[in-house]
Image (cartoon, rainbow, N blue to C red):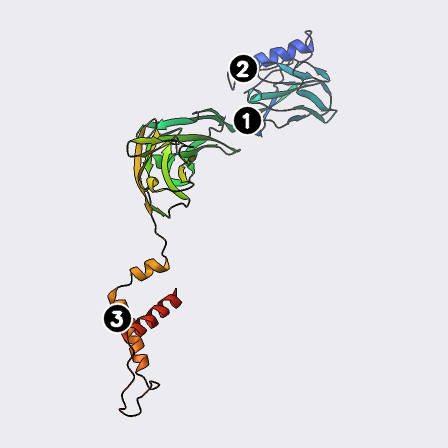
Amino acid sequence: MKMVVCGCCAASWRRCVVMSLRLLFLLPAGLPVRSQGESQSDNKQMDNITIRQGETLFLSCSQGDFVTHTAWLNRSSILYTGEDKWSVDPRVSLVTLNQDEFTIKIEDVDLADEGQYICAVQTSSRPRTTSVHIIVQVPPKIVNLSKDLVVNEGSNVTLMCLANGKPEPAIGWRMLSPSDDSLSSDSEVLEILFISRYRAGVYECTASNDIAVDTQTVELTVNYPPSVSDGRDVGVTLGQRGVLQCEADAVPEADFEWYRDDRRIFSDFDGIEIEDAGAFSKLTFFNVSEADYGNYTCIAINKLGSANTSIILYEIIEPTSSTLLQEMTSSDLEQTAFENNDMLEGPGAVQDGNSGTSTVFTPTCLLLVVLLQLLLKF
């Protein structure tokens, strides 16, 4: 591509520069163009310059001897002619202008600054142009992301992520928390069919190119009806404190209700307290009475359904000396008597001097010995 800058024409230098800019985009490539002095202009194409958005761009061209006029132009306007600034953009400024170099800078480069720039130099003999193409790279930025979602179990879910950047960013999805490598996508869309409660969590969208990476997250909440853990029966001694516990898994969290037969139980009723904390509910008896023993039902409820479990509060009788003796079986008595009889007939037993037979204890005496040993055990 060639460009003509007017020689020593009568028109002003500024008009010549504008005309040169127009010719740059209107004349076909390769068409010979000559100045008024029939001298062909020198045109130099520099290698492309790649710069990242937000950085500072320096544009420089060599001057040489006998330079009468010089200018920097972009696609549609003049930026500088010599020391005169034509651009109204405050980011553009002059860095160096001397016999050897003409340099300007553009701060905080943006995508709109991309394109061709031309340094036009007018010497005493002929014009010379140097052109360079600026490529602006833009880090990826996610511009459209699905909002946090709340869905019911069994629904179909679609997550969307859109991003800008240059080069065009690659977009992907993954399940971040809890981590699940099997649930991912290498596109802007992540589809989850018939979602289950185990797919609830935080999902991350990643947009990346050669410049940088941008990530954003979406929280996905899955509602499901309650499921209640099997209740554990509780044994409590009369007059003691008793606690029945109920646990439910549900989203949203379940509300709890307690029943005795068909009668609902409320807190602070007949020495009873009900305490709910998240997934747990406790039914506390501060002083268990005979009337409190029986079957209790815990019901967990949310907007999607309910579940229940039964818990039995039963009596535990503390053992005493009298009850232990009453519960002693005949076999226990016989075994104890047998052991004591062996002890009495052992080597240390008292022998009758005349007959050589052992002294026989009366049944009453033997019973007393057995009872004494039992009492010493407890």
In depth, the one of 176 and 123 nearer the eye is 176
The secondary element bearing badge 1 is classed as: strand
Mark 2 or 3: the one toward you: 3
- Would residue 103 be seen by someone viewing this image from the given angle? yes
Image location (x, y in percent) of residue 163: 46, 26
The secondary element bearing badge 2 is classed as: helix
Q: Is residue 19 left or right of residue 161?
A: right
Q: Amino acid at mark 3?
A: Glu
In depth, the one of 303 and 289 nearer the eye is 289
Image location (x, y in percent) of residue 61: 66, 26
Position of the C terminus, as image quadrant, is bottom left
> Label 2, on which residue?
25
Whether 346 is drawn above or below 55: the answer is: below
Which of pointers 3 and 1 lies earlier in the amino acid sequence?
A: 1
In depth, the one of 124 and 140 nearer the eye is 140
Q: Which mark is residue 334?
A: 3
Q: Is residue 370 left or right of residue 67?
A: left
> Label 1, on which residue?
135
Q: Amino acid at mark 1?
A: Ile
Pointers 2 and 3 in contact (C-beta within 8 Å): no
Which of pointers 2 and 1 lies earlier in the amino acid sequence?
A: 2
Q: Quadrant of residue 225?
A: top left
Q: Residue at x 73, y 21 (%)?
A: 66
In depth, the one of 365 and 113 nearer the eye is 365
Q: CA distance from mark 3 to mark 1?
A: 107 Å
Crowd around label 2: few <14 · some 14–19 · many ≥20 (10 Å): some
Q: Quadrant of residue 128?
A: top right
Mark 3 or 1: the one toward you: 3
